[in-house]
Amino acid sequence: MMHKGKLLATAVLVTAASVASAGTAPIQELTVSPDITLDLSGQLVSDENTAVDDLAGAVALQSLGAIPANADLTAYHMASNGDHLLVLDITVELPGGVTARPSDVVHNSGGVFSIAFDGQAEGIPTGARIDALGQDGAGNLLLSFDTTIDFSGFIANDEDVVLFDDPSFSLLLDGSAVGIPAAADVDAIYYAHEAATFYLSLDISGTAGGIFFNDEDLLVYESGPGIWAMAYDGSAEHPAWIAGDLDAAFATFIAGFLFRDGFEGP
């Protein structure tokens, strides 16, 4: 399998004499979830869990509460207040009498579950599943689905990213128009809204913008200049990733770095 290696030195530290001239802010930690149980640096991570990879060899499990072992976590995002947003691949009963379907976004605040986005109530067709999840700077949901959906005004394919600004949907990223193979499905989203930069994992191997990727990798797409790069080469970090697929990702950036267009990273 061909790999490109992880993008590391893509911005410069913010000082009085230095400003980033190219690239995106480096990732400090990446929260990940695989589609099967993987041994990542001696830590067993199952498909219903997430783990934090410090990109220096250490991986630590994250507590998401009582998620049924037969469920697969297919999308994840950490809200600005530290609460967890997640999607599961099957209909499950969660503590507190909460029924969660694959078209719903579940909110977990300290082990208390609720439905943050009710897919059926919002008109998501029966059988469609959310398989990638993020938020913009205003807290609106970013969603990608496992099938084509007609939103009565635009069509969203499985390589696209949709913005839900309650009660409206809009197309935020037209995947095939920016170089994502039409055969690919977006598996994970993190959106750095300050610079309109997308971090995406896809469910197949292929190329986007000339960058080769596998399904365990995380690509970065800067929508301003239209540039693709590798952000996380999964199997280069942990060989076990070769057997798995990156189902969900949430990035934490090194503080004090600037994005390409001058916005300071988190």
Image (tube, helix red, strand yellow):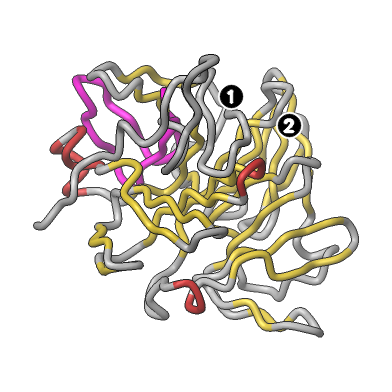
Q: Secondary structure at mark 2?
A: strand
- Near-viewer residue (156 or 14): 14
Above or below: residue 176 compared with residue 145? below
Toward the front, the furthest residue is 17
Residue 5 in the image, given as x and y percentages of width and height: 19, 43
> Residue at the location (59% across, 62% down)?
144
Q: Main secondary structure of the magenta part?
A: strand
Tell me how far mark 1 sits from mark 2, CA to CA: 9 Å
Q: Are marks 1 and 2 in contact (CB under 8 Å)?
A: yes
Going from the N terminus, do you reach mark 1 or mark 2 first? Answer: 1
- Near-viewer residue (108 or 220): 220
Q: Which residue is mark 2?
A: 113
Q: Secondary structure at mark 1?
A: loop
The answer to whether residue 136 is left or right of residue 58 is right
> Residue at the location (67% across, 54% down)?
142
- Quadrant of the rendering where the C terminus is positioned: top right
The disc at residue 65 is 1
Above or below: residue 205 compared with residue 26? below
The answer to whether residue 27 is left or right of residue 109 is left
The answer to whether residue 81 is left or right of residue 258 is right
Toward the right, the furthest residue is 167
- Quadrant of the rendering where the N terminus is positioned: bottom left
- Give, as a single range, the part of the protein colored magenta: 28-50
> Residue at the location (33% across, 30% down)?
45
